[in-house]
Each structure stands twice: as C-alpha cells, then as structure tokens.
Amino acid sequence: MSTKLFDLSGKTAMITGSSRGLGRAMAEGMAAAGASVILNGVNEARLQEAVEEMKAEGYDVIGAPFDVADEAAIVAAFEKLDADGVAVDILVNNAGIQFRKPIVELETKDWQKVIDVNLTAVFICGREAAKRMIPRGHGKIINIGSLLSDAARATVSPYGAAKGGVRMLTKIMTAEWASKGIQVNAIGPGYMATEMNTALIENEEFNEWVCKRTPSGRWGQPEEMAGTAIYLASDASNYINGQLIYVDGGMISVL
Ligand code: GCO
C-alpha cells in the first residue's frame, strides 16, 4: 500500500489556535506530510513568531490572525483567503480555552466565553469552510473534542458541555456534508502536557491521578496528536466519517 495515502502535498490546512500546543503540533505534522499550513491565533506577535519558526523549517506557512470568538473576524479571514486565492482543503477546529470552577460559583459570562471559543467557533469556522468545500466536492474537517466529550469530572462544566457538543456537531456536520465529499471527524485528546494543563501537571495529587488513571501511565505529548490528524486529513480516511478517535493513552476505554 502506497504511503501516498497519507501524503498531504497540494493541500492547504487551516488549524485554529495553532501558535502553540496541540494546534502547533498538528500543524507541524501536517506540514511535514506536505501540506501548506495556515496558522491561526489571537495573539499576533506569538502567531508571527510561530509562522517564522515553521518557515525556517522549510514549510509553506502563512498566518491568519483572528479571534475564533469573533464571528465577523472569522468571516473576514475566510473572505481574505478567497481574495488571495487560498482554498482551505483541511480545517482543524482546535482553538480552545479552559475555565475551571464549580457550577454554583461560575458566572454566566465565564460559561459563555468557553462556549463561544470551544463550541460556537467550531460551528462558525466549519460553516465558512464547508461553504467553500461543497462547490469543490471535497474537504476534511477535524474537530478537537476531549475525554470530556464522553466522560465528566467536576469543575469543568462549560468545557465539558462544549466538548460534548463538539462530538454531536461532528455527527451533524457529517449528516449534512458527507454526501458532498467532505469527511468530518473529531480527535479526543487525553490528558496532554500543554500550557492549558500546566496547573494540573504541577498539582501533585492531580498529576498522580492522571498517571495512575491513564493505562499508558503518563501524560500525552502534543506531538502525539499529529499522526491521527494527518490520517484524518489524508486520503487514507476518505471513508471515515462522523468518528471521534481518542488519543488518550487508553483512558476512555479502561475503568
Ligand atoms: C481538565 C483538562 C481536560 C484536558 C482534556 C482531556 O481540566 O480536566 O483541562 O479538559 O485538557 O480536555 O481530554
């Protein structure tokens, strides 16, 4: 079987929230597989630094600075890509924030911000990408879920509600777009060693829990997301649709 199945040459991938963390790791992997990459971030300085770093590695990279919580900014970003003749073949809806607080202490504004970034942005970016993929008859959309798409823990209600929604939105996008040649799937990261989780890693009790609760016995590394992202972005997954694939060291599967 040819490895061309996993070749992303000639494809352009947009990864939201990709200046660092999981998004950056997936962007690096897709670029190494041949894709041209559109990095996104809300902090323009950090985004430009990431673009320059990846260009220095010899990759074809541009930056698209927009806040995924700002619908007008998303629409304008896609319209600029249109004007520049850049077609997004692969969209990774990765941008996400976390806000940990018990429900009874959580203010609605903080709930809403997490929902806006972690769920509504997936809808808006997905809609804008699909509007352009449908006429072309092909496209790949990869939404980033979470263990919290299926399993719960206390103090992360907006994040879990959003990630549960991402799982279902992935299926509804499939229902509407699979017949148009678009494959929509999700990746569920386990407990990954990212900046979002620094507080958890540095918490001795939580760190011990993750290492004991994860069958692989350790936190995941951002780079360990790249292979599944490449797979779901490539022709190797043209008959995979509506799935959520866990990259979690086995945590979701073992009591
Ligand atoms: C938390 C963590 C999780 C992980 C990841 C697990 O507070 O429990 O932030 O949400 O980041 O989503 O899949």
Image (tube, rainbow, N blue to C red):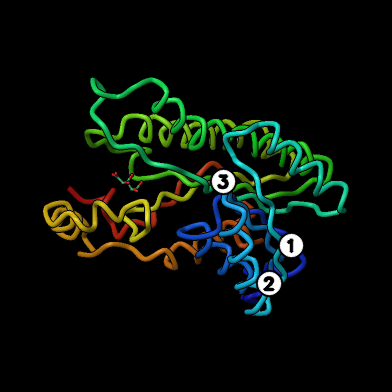
- Residue labelled with disc 1: 11
First of labels 1, 2 by sequence position: 1
- Could you tell me if residue 240 is visible in this image? no
206 or 129, nearer to the observer? 206
- Residue labelled with disc 3: 93
137 or 130, nearer to the observer? 130
Residue 223 coordinates in the image, percent (x, y): 44, 68
Residue 69 coordinates in the image, percent (x, y): 57, 34
- Amino acid type indicated by mark 1: Lys
Q: How many marks?
A: 3
96 or 188, nearer to the observer? 96
First of labels 1, 3 by sequence position: 1
Q: Secondary structure at mark 1?
A: loop
Q: Secondary structure at mark 2?
A: loop
Position of residue 44 relative to residue 72, above or below, is: below
- Residue labelled with disc 2: 34
Tag nearer the camera, 1 or 3: 3
Residue 50 coordinates in the image, percent (x, y): 59, 65
Residue beneath the point at 26% across and 32% down: 101
- Amino acid type indicated by mark 3: Asn
- Amino acid type indicated by mark 2: Gly
Q: Secondary structure at mark 3?
A: strand
- Could you tell me if residue 42 is visible in this image? yes
Neighbour tally class for label 1: few under 14, some 14-19, many 20 plus, Cα within 10 Å: many
Left or right of residue 138: residue 190? left
Q: CA distance from mark 1 to mark 3?
A: 17 Å
Left or right of residue 207: residue 127? right
Q: Residue furthest bottom?
A: 57
